[in-house]
Amino acid sequence: MIGLIPAGGIAARLGPLPCSKELLPAGTYVTPDGLRPRPVITYLLAQWQRAGIERALVVLRPGKWDIPAYLGDGRAFGPHIAYLIVHEPHGAAYTIAAALPFLTGQTVALGLPDVILAPDDVYATLATHHATRQPDLTLGLFPCQQPHTADMVALAGDSRRVTAIEIKPAQTSLQWTWMAAIWSPAVTRVLAEVVDADRVARQSEPSRPELHIGTVFQAAIEQGLRVEGVTFPSGHALDIGTPAGWAASRGRML
């Protein structure tokens, strides 16, 4: 399994920052020398270390050199880390597609580097589910109070089967949003197809909206791939890419 971190965003919701948003302090470490700020991306790397994910790719846009400067090769944080650069600023799906040459035949764990997940074994739980039931795509699902800001997930009755992804719906009765994912090579193929089709469409329609990862997952569902969700009803996903989320994270101490 290889971890994949899209870190190409510009943090528009937070305004000008002194560092990449993935390195914003979100809580603190307790060390023998006192408290130390904890960058938000390290929560994801700790999740992956617990899940046994030993390799990771971080996809950056040009200029976010503070991330590799801080994380280095990853040995201080868990997984061995390598870096890629994305040059197509058309959304998160393009960012993860920059890694396509390195994903052939791989099981991929997708991590959102500005989201703090609880409990701390979310990826360990998803990895066990994915290995045991062997769907094409396993999604970690969390309760969502603001559906208009999220990818909302429809489940088939009381089953784990995901039947649809609704991206930022104005109104919906859906309760779950995905915040973590593990997929098999069939989904990587769909990713390549969706991004290629969008790239062609942009030649005649350059102002097309950004391409969401949820659009790729919906295409996988429509192609008949098996998509399952693992719910964390008592868990939470704190997005520090928003002013409210970052403010809420500042009181964390670990």
Image: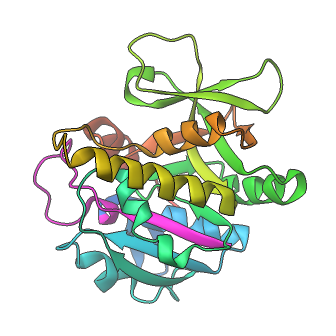
Q: How many marks?
A: 0
Residue 91 seen anywhere in this rendered image of the structure: no
Q: Please give the range of residues in magenta.
A: 1-23
Q: Position of residue 229 (x, y in %)?
A: 72, 38
Left or right of 156, for residue 171:
left
Left or right of 29, for residue 198:
left
Is 190 or 106 nearer to us in this picture? 190
Is 121 or 95 nearer to us in this picture? 95
Query: In the picture, which quadrant includes the N terminus?
Result: bottom right
Q: Which residue is at a point 29% across and 40% down the rendered structure image?
A: 242
Q: Which residue is at a point 41% across and 53% down the rendered structure image?
A: 195
Q: Identify the coloring.
A: rainbow
Residue 63 seen anywhere in this rendered image of the structure: yes
Identity of the residue furthest to the left in this view: 16
Left or right of 122, for residue 250:
left
Q: Is residue 13 magenta?
A: yes
Instruction: Using the image, determine if residue 33 lies above or below residue 110.
Output: below
Q: Position of residue 204 (x, y in %)?
A: 19, 43
Q: Is residue 16 magenta?
A: yes
Q: Position of residue 100 (x, y in %)?
A: 49, 70
Instruction: Using the image, determine if residue 53 lies above or below residue 69.
Output: above
Q: In the rendered image, which quarter is residue 159 located in?
A: top right
Q: In the rendered image, which quarter is residue 108 located in?
A: bottom right
Predominant SS of the magenta segment: loop
Is 122 or 189 nearer to us in this picture? 189
Q: Which residue is at a point 21% across and 41% down the rendered structure image?
A: 13
Q: Which residue is at a point 29% across and 85% down the rendered structure image?
A: 69
Q: Position of residue 60 (x, y in %)?
A: 31, 70
